[in-house]
Amino acid sequence: MVMPSANDVLSLDADQLVHVLQGFGEPAFRARQLFEWLWRHDASSYQDVTVWSRPLRERMSQAWPIRRAVAVQTQVGVDGTTKLLLGLSDGQRVETVLLPHPYGYSVCVSSQVGCAMGCTFCASGLNGRIRQLSAGELLEQVRYAEMILKPSGQHVRRVDVMGIGEPLDNYANLLKFMRMAHHEAAFHLSYRHFTVSTSGLVPAITQLANEGLPVTLAVSLHAPNDEVRRRLMPVNQAYPLAKLIPACDDFARRTGRRVTFEYLLLKDVNDSQQLAHELAGLLAGRLCHVNLIPWNPVAEHDWTPSPMSTVRTFQRIVQDQGISCTIRKELGQEIDAACGQLRLREEESLSL
Ligand code: SAH
Ligand code: SF4
């Protein structure tokens, strides 16, 4: 697996920057200055850090070069949704989506290049997992969103780790990213405004519950029983519902946060009224919310999206059992192909 270079300054947290700068005989406050210049003032080279002496700027450029992501493609939808394709320092690409909501903007970030989980409806995993994203590459996605919003004086309010990749398969970088983004000298985002979406890696869900961070956990359930779920998600072999659901309960109990269950609807696969009743039965009495997702067709996968009338019937059945259930609003429909598709399309056109 290709890893980003070792002297990756964008992945250093505030304490690590103190250590680096002390190595150059500099006081700790210089680290705070650099952290702010990197994440609040968008410094693209040390020459931008005008509060520093020229020799210090030179030394840092040599030892810890700033390698920013570059925007390869930007698509803006009529509803204000912006989809970015970012090029990373080794030429890999990831997608980031900025979405408008009544409460402000959210950004959907990718956590890996590709994905190893192999879900049978998803574009992100078609070529497997190519590599992990570093903490700095995760932060770069939020910074790009902030840069887009800056002229209007707005900021990113929520971060959804729901783009390409399985975030809990990149646990250490995910956690470092959330801690850095939370830092007041970076984006000062509240932990409550992060949502981490997982296909259901049970040990990592437990580990996340142990961190004591009030982030929201979203679990891609997509079926109320193992028989249907294993057709859709190979992860169900290792972590069937008998393991997954108790881990979600434990997360909800220990963080006091309700868990979101995502449920993608595929025609004649997991969208019957009987399965809606079964889902309601499975989740009855739990601190949770269900988000129904209309499937975005992926050419390589042979499923059909459920008709909207079926999605609404499914929702009503779940709601009638007293469970909070919404249908994911499709923002930026004309630009927002299924997650991972923009990157794949770009790769295909590059290889033509
Ligand atoms: N790997 C994580 C997070 C990224 S996927 C996870 O699986 O949860 C984010 C969400 O998009 C998941 O609920 C996933 O099931 C869903 N998804 C994947 N492919 C999709 C498609 N083609 N149309 C709609 N949703 C899709
Ligand atoms: Fe990976 Fe999530 Fe896609 Fe499954 S749905 S292949 S876990 S990105």
Image (spheres, rainbow, N blue to C red):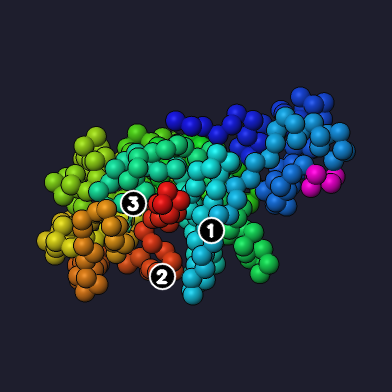
Q: Image point 24% across, 61% down: which residue? A: 265
The label number, if any, that marks residue 199 in the structure image: none
State yes or no: Cβ of the residue under disc 3 lies below 8 Å from any atom of ligand 1: yes
Residue bearing the label numbered 2: 334
Between 264 and 194, the one nearer to me in the picture? 264
State yes or no: Cβ of the residue under disc 1 lies below 8 Å from any atom of ligand 1: no
Residue bearing the label numbered 3: 123
On the rendered structure, is 164 left or right of 292? right
Name the element at disc 1: strand
Can residue 39 be seen?
Answer: yes
Between 131 and 264, the one nearer to me in the picture? 131
Which amino acid lies under the numbered mark 1 shown in the image of this protein?
Answer: Gln
Residue 197 is situated, as x and y percent measured from the top left of the image, at: 39, 49
Query: Alpha-carbon distance for marks 2 and 1?
Result: 15 Å
Residue 338 is situated, as x and y percent measured from the top left of the image, at: 36, 58
Compared to residue 131, the image places residue 40 above or below, namely: below
The label number, if any, that marks residue 73 in the structure image: 1
